[in-house]
Amino acid sequence: MGRARIKRKSTYIDMTAMSDVTVLLLTFFMLTSTFIKKEPVNVITPASISEIKIPETDVLQIWVEPTGKIFMSLDKQPDLKAVLEKMGEEYGITFSAEQEKKFIVASTFGVPMQRMSNFLNLTLEEQDKILKTQGIPCDSTDNQFKSWVRHARSVNPDLRIAIKADADTPYAIIKNVMNSLQDLRENRYNLITSLKSVSEG
């Protein structure tokens, strides 16, 4: 007697629905995610129990690292362009269209105005290397930090100021930054901290 033949079934699986779901999920995450700005220096913020969130738009962020170097960022490209032009007028520097374009696409800035033109002529990789060694001057003889804040506020009056200082930054440096803000009558600003875990007991 002959063996019974088992009918072969097709192993084909329709993956159309799976690929549709994958594309939809990918699109969702791309549209809803917010990109973290590249920071010029690694700042380890002090811990606190405050849960107040910084707004996502109209923010002037100030980084202060332990040796006193100051860096800044604005979240809107039109604001960056307008502020650079105002700083150029104050310091007698004219920027080309290419330099302005490089400035507004950069995530942060922090070089003295006297070096800004040369800085903007560099490639992004070279800028990243130089930026870490510079910083915006904020001393009694040359307080360019104050000028940046003043022009940023004049361009966008709705700006919220947020200071992100390293936990090891000496108090004298932070006080100097705060005094500069007080000179401009900027008495409201946020201090960015990391959330401290409170142990129950």
Image (spheres, helix red, strand yellow):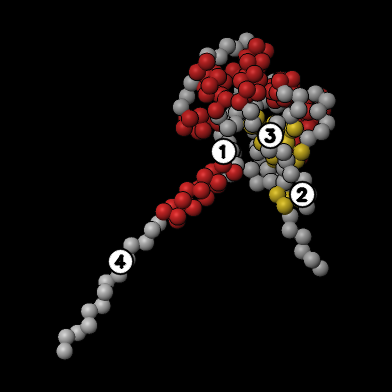
Q: Which residue is mark 2?
A: 51
The kind of residue tagged 4 is Ser
Q: Which residue is mark 4?
A: 10
Number of numbered tags placed on the structure image? 4
**Mark 4 Cα within 10 Å, few/some/many (few <14, many 20+)?**
few
The kind of residue tagged 2 is Glu
Nearest to the observer: residue 131 or residue 15:
15
Of badges 2 and 4, nearer the viewer stands 4
Give percent across and percent down for residue 162: 73, 36
Give percent across and percent down for residue 131: 55, 31
Of badges 4 and 1, nearer the viewer stands 4
| Residue sitting at the far front | 1
Which type of secondary structure does the marked residue at label 3 adopt? Answer: loop
Of badges 2 and 3, nearer the viewer stands 3
**Mark 3 Cα within 10 Å, few/some/many (few <14, many 20+)?**
few
- Structural distance between the alpha carbons of marks 3 and 1: 17 Å
In the shown orientation, is residue 157 left or right of residue 106?
right
| Tags 3 and 1 touching, CB below 8 Å | no
Q: Of callouts 2 and 3, which one flags the residue occurring earlier in the amino acid sequence?
A: 2
Which type of secondary structure does the marked residue at label 1 adopt? Answer: loop
Of badges 2 and 1, nearer the viewer stands 2
Q: Of callouts 4 and 3, which one flags the residue occurring earlier in the amino acid sequence?
A: 4
Q: Which residue is mark 3?
A: 57
Nearest to the observer: residue 181 or residue 200:
200
Q: Residue at x 56, y 38 (%)?
A: 38
The kind of residue tagged 3 is Thr
Q: Which residue is mark 1?
A: 38
| Tags 4 and 3 touching, CB below 8 Å | no
Residue 178 appears in view: yes
